[in-house]
Amino acid sequence: MLNLHQAEFIRSAVKTADFPADGLPQIVFAGKSNVGKSSTINKILNRRNFARVGGQPGKTIHINFFSIDKQAYFVDLPGYGYAKVSKGERDRWAALLETYFTSGLITLGIQIVDIRHKPTADDKTMTDCFLATGQPFVVLANKLDKIKKSELAGNLNTIRETLLLPEEVPVIPFSAEKGTGRDEILALIEDHVAAHSTQA
Ligand code: GDP
């Protein structure tokens, strides 16, 4: 079991040398700006203001590493798809992401999408980056509290079809607001960390 109380910010990385390379699993959270990525990390950790919520979208082009119980890292990728960023910022984002995705350090990918909407081209690009790592990958369909029950199956299907997800990739309905889906993603994370430590 992971002691989630033992969570601490390690650093904001802007280059390869900043990435922790101690062999611990790196659980990577990605999502469009405003999709609820910070809220999701906070909900999983049962914290209020651990990862920043609702700040300036698109302004943070660094990768935040958090140590979880000295057994794993939560990795908070900078949000994407914010309309008002300059080409320079977009290029910096892409270069940093490319550096991290080719580092071989990612062990579990978690992409957060909005359950209400068809995923964007940027979402699809992000999915493809995760799939290319060959590592386990999960999609969290956030803001479940904002749709009707009758919309659930159809919306999940749209997400799966738009992102062209392989069958083994789960799409987990989630609400960072209500905590729905938290047990499921936490169990998945704990299984992943446990499997990793028996390998090492
Ligand atoms: P980030 O930019 O992806 O880190 O998004 P934030 O975590 O800052 O959340 C963006 C906004 O969406 C905030 O106003 C959150 O309160 C809201 N939000 C996040 N998750 C949920 C959710 O599951 N349900 C609802 N209703 N609102 C959410």
Image (cartoon, rainbow, N blue to C red):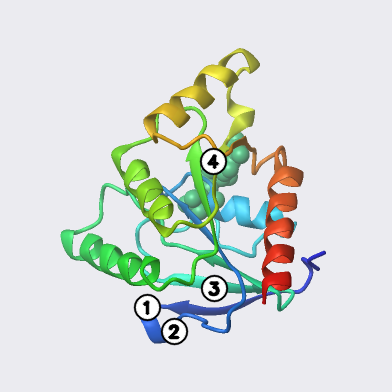
Mark 4 falls on what kind of element?
Answer: loop
Instruction: Inspect the image, locate mark 1, and give the three-letter code of the amino acid beneath it.
Output: Val
Three-letter amino acid code at the position of disc 2: Asp
Indicate the quadrant containing the N terminus: top left, top right, bottom left or bottom right.
bottom right
- Asked whether residue 71 is in view, the answer is yes
Q: Residue at x 66, y 57 (%)?
A: 42
Q: Is mark 3 within 8 Å of ligand 1?
A: no
- Which numbered mark, 2 or 4, is in the foreground of this view? 4
Report if residue 54 is visible in the image: no
Residue located beneath label 3 in the image: 65
Q: Which mark is residue 14?
A: 1
Q: How far apart in space, not on screen, are marks 3 and 1 (Cα)?
A: 11 Å
Q: Secondary structure at mark 2?
A: helix
Q: Residue at x 72, y 42 (%)?
A: 179
Residue occupied by mark 2: 18
Q: Earlier in the sequence, mark 2 or mark 4?
A: 2
Residue designated by label 4: 169
Q: Could you tell which of marks 3 and 4 lies nearer the N-terminus?
A: 3
In this rendering, position of residue 195 left or right of residue 141: right
124 displayed left or right of 18? left
Label 3: how many residues lie within 10 Å, few (<14), some (14-19) or many (20+)? many
**Residue placed at 65% from the left, 71% from the top?**
72
In the image as oriented, which residue stretches furthest toward the bottom? 17
